[in-house]
């Protein structure tokens, strides 16, 4: 039961993290990555007992770093 409770939020966060690279500039990707990370982190934090606020802070940091670390050439949106 605990594994299932932990696995679903992690999979959701990983799928949201793939969207962190959306944006034309590094700043925009960091901003969208941070927002997506905050949402995923809040979900994971709530599910794991860490707390939604703490999870959102951790997720926002991870999402912003991921978004800023990507570049436009790494994004393939079918254009």
Image: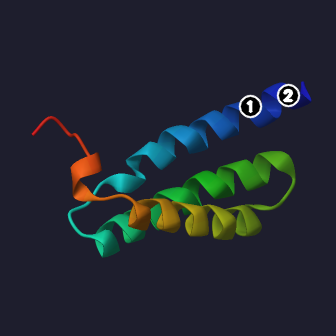
Based on the displayed image, in which of its 4 quarters is residue 56 positioned? bottom right
Q: Quadrant of the N terminus?
A: top right
Please, is residue 76 above or below residue 4 in the view?
below
x%, y% of residue 63?
52, 61
Q: Which sits in the foreground, 19 or 1?
A: 19
x%, y% of residue 5?
81, 33
Which element carries disc 1, helix, strand or loop?
Answer: helix
Q: Which mark is residue 57?
A: none
Which element carries disc 2, helix, strand or loop?
Answer: helix
Please, is residue 33 above or below residue 3 in the view?
below
Please, is residue 18 above or below residue 2 in the view?
below
Q: Is residue 46 left or right of residue 39?
A: right
Tell me what residue is drawn at x 75 percent, y 68 percent.
54
Q: Are marks 2 and 1 in contact (CB under 8 Å)?
A: yes
Q: Which mark is residue 7?
A: 1
Tell me what residue is drawn at x 59 percent, y 44 percent.
13
Classed neighbour count for the residue bearing mark 1: other residues with Cα under 10 Å, few (<14), some (14–19), many (≥20): some
x%, y% of residue 53?
72, 69
> In the rendered image, which residue does mark 2 sit on?
3
Count all numbered tags in the image, as a single digit: 2
Q: Is residue 13 left or right of residue 71?
A: right
**Residue extending furthest toward the left:** 79
Tell me what residue is drawn at x 54 percent, y 58 percent.
37
Based on the displayed image, in which of its 4 quarters is residue 30 positioned? bottom left
Whole-angstrom CA distance, mark 2 to mark 1, is 6 Å
Please, is residue 33 above or below residue 79 in the view?
below
Tell me what residue is drawn at x 34 percent, y 64 percent.
29
Q: Which sits in the foreground, 67 or 40?
A: 67
Q: Quadrant of the C terminus?
A: top left
x%, y% of residue 31?
39, 71
């Amino acid at each position: 039961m605990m594994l299932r409770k932990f696995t679903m939020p992690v999979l959701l966060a990983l799928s949201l993290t793939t969207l962190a690279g959306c944006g034309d500039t590094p700043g925009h990707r960091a901003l969208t990555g941070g927002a997506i990370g905050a949402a995923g982190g809040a979900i994971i934090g709530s599910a794991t007992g860490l707390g939604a606020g703490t999870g959102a802070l951790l997720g926002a940091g991870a999402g912003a770093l991921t978004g800023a670390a990507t570049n436009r050439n790494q994004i393939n949106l079918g254009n």
